Amino acid sequence: MADSQLLKPAILVISDTASQDPSTDKAGNVLTETFKTDGGDRWATPAIKIVPDNVLDIQRQIQQWTDGEEYFNLVLTTGGTGFAVKDVTPEAVSPLIHRHAPGLVHGMLASSLEVTPFAIMSRPVAGVRKNTLILTLPGSPKGAKENLQAVIKLLPHACIQAAGANSRSIHAGGVSKLEREAGISTSSPDTTTPSEKEQHHRHHHHHGHDHSHSHSCGHGHGHGHIVPKPHTSPSERPQSNDPNAGPTRRYRESPYPMLSVDEALRLIYEHSPEPTIIEVPIDTSIVGSVVAEDVCAAEAVPAYRASIVDGYAVIASAHTAHGKGDTKGKFPVASVSHAQATSMPPPLEHRTIARITTGAPLPENANAVVMVEDTALISTTSDGTEEAVVEILTDDIKPGENVREPGSDVSLGSKILQTGDFITPVGGEIGLLASTGTKTITVFKKPRVGVLSTGDELVEHNNPAPLQGGQIRDSNRPSLISCLQSWGFPTVDLGIARDTPANQLEFALRDALRGSASKPAVDIIITTGGVSMGELDLLKPTIERNLGGTIHFGRVSMKPGKPTTFATIPFKPPISSSTQGVVGNDAQEERETRLIFSLPGNPASALVTLNLFVLPSLHKSMGLAIRAALSDNNNNNNNNNNPVSSPASLGLPLVTAVLTHAIPLDPKRTEYHRATVSASSGTGALLATSTGLGGKGAGVGQRSSRVGSLAGANALLVLPPGKGVVERGAWVQALLMGNVVGE
Ligand code: AMP
Ligand code: MG
């Protein structure tokens, strides 16, 4: 087999001893030999690394092998799968696995059990991360070799599939062909019927599909659904603490890999649903929406020939060769046309004029209006209440002067708004829609967001009773809800879920998604609290174990906000509530996914992560990614209608500002430092000033519990990790949360 087609294996030896003295490792060589002797020429020479029995070291090395462009096809670990206290391999590997493969675990255990009953004491894990298959083998060279031999023939097929090969072509030929290729055979012939095969194919073909419908306005945009695809049962995903296990058996270090903010944003973008289209009447509730279909004018503006000034409607003829018209002179005032008139004025007779007000319809035959300023009153009616004769003092009036022709502002049927346009609060778009008699508009639905606080210690912020013991006031709910409302999203106050009894949280989350008579169903849930490392931090276990959800990340390298957690859970909406007003949604029969953002409980962390992580997701769901893609296409003129695949244009706007004082850096994590950004009245440059430093280093001023660090803040300074300080006068990047203020 050509070298380029060889599968790439890697072996991670996990052993405190071998990491100190590599010469003590035997398993690495034994496994390398096994690839040569039993691997059937399918494998390249394995890469080998040795790490101690430490969760983070193990995770870091495996991610290096799996997450890059040059990923390995197979990662084998050896060691650390037993029951000894230091054996942490399954705990380290499990959270890395996206799709578990219990069949491989079963196969390895079954073959080991034939050799020794002690195999029952091994805790192997197997599954796929991204494009790589990961297997944990025991530490003893003999056990590791036997386990690998038990599955090695099947691994090429699994690896090729994991790497993303078209499963339809792999499976053409049925199971017997696969077995032949793997060099194994079962005793029974291939008895799969054609229809069974078909189903098998269809099942695989369906994996991860994400369909979208193109719409009549010609711009392709998906408003479909992501089909949830749990690959494991909750019992096979031991990432989160088992709340029944109590404080003594909880993890002492988070098993979730620490993601960078960018990685976290990418996952959020990937899992945030495409927008849904709704048709709604024209009123102020559409402010802040993105238009989903082009809008054409239902009426012309103006609908009749209207005067632009107060004055006199006249019959002007084309100017003569010497440049003068024939309007000068004294004329009887034959009629009056007011803007509030419901009927049209009578036609104008030759050599007469009609008084007219701004916006009023011109009489038939009239073709221009003379401003009142260019006229003089000559005589009145006998009772003195009406004008009889008026003199026009100018000859310069041309036909069409001071007249708005029908449709000259907006012509009938012209495009007044197009897909991707934003309905601003300034009023221009609403005005255009209103003036053209538009009855309804299709827009992308703004997601409805529920906000839930968690914790036994919380009391309502307005509870009149004085605080007792460890009670604190729930400040997160009012602050998050007000922020969401200021962004224009409908919110639902989901109250407080207590940590005990344990199932309160589960019920609160389920009820929020289903909705009730008093609270409409929400599209996205934001919780605060319960994501730290305490035994009462129930969010992750509840999402995974009780709601069958998937946690996409549970830790982010940032300050504040490290324990920020993002998950999706499968949800089957009740037909009646989900379909109201939804245009062309054929997804009602299928399960959908709902997003849960579980933000840290500390008030500053909660608000910072709301701004940083939740807003881009809401932006995608309300159609701003489609808007960005359309404007990109227009700018590049590249006829590429793919929606943007990065969150770059979503979320808070990023500006650059000059620091007015030095700020100490965090050595490890990116800090989102609360600050006020103002415009210098002298130079116009943006100046950034911290809302509070206080103390040394990461002082109390920016402590994550200090919600006051956000009072008065309109920006988050993005301070990358580093040594020392970022100096006064340095340029820093700032994410703008509010309007720039004056100096
Ligand atoms: P937890 O993640 O639940 O351990 O919470 C971390 C910290 O945030 C604790 O000090 C909590 O008391 C505090 N906290 C949690 N929820 C809220 C809230 N809704 N309002 C104010 N503080 C909170
Ligand atoms: Mg708590």
Image (cartoon, grey):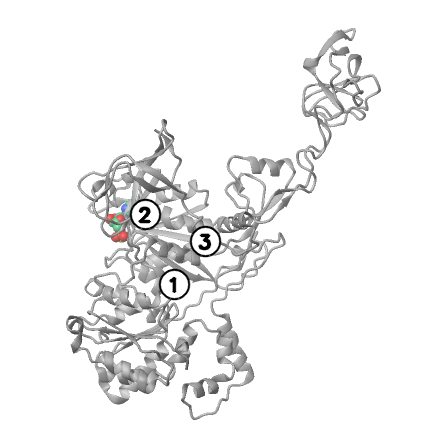
The residue at which mark 1 appears reads as 549
Dot 3 lies on which element?
A: loop
Q: Position of residue 140 (x, y in %)?
A: 21, 81
Inter-mark Cα distance, 3 to 2: 19 Å
Between residues 155 and 439, which one lies in front from this camera angle?
Answer: 155
Marks 3 and 2, the one that precedes in the sequence: 3
Image: 594 above or below 149: above
Q: Which mark is residue 606?
A: 2
Image: 316 above or below 50: above
Label 3: how many Cα within 10 Å (few below 14, some 14–19, many 20+): many
Q: Amino acid at mark 1?
A: Gly
Inter-mark Cα distance, 1 to 2: 22 Å
Q: Amino acid at mark 2?
A: Ala
Between residues 337 and 126, which one lies in front from this camera angle?
Answer: 126
Q: Amino acid at mark 3?
A: Asp
Marks 3 and 1, the one that precedes in the sequence: 3
Residue at the image position 54 percent from the left and 47 percent from the top: 635
Image: 467 above or below 586: above
The residue at which mark 3 appears reads as 523
Q: Is mark 2 within 8 Å of ligand 1?
A: yes
Label 2: how many Cα within 10 Å (few below 14, some 14–19, many 20+): many
Label 1: how many Cα within 10 Å (few below 14, some 14–19, many 20+): many
Q: Are marks 3 and 2 in contact (CB under 8 Å)?
A: no
Q: Position of residue 656 (x, y in %)?
A: 36, 40
Question: Does residue 519 appear in the picture of this structure?
Answer: no
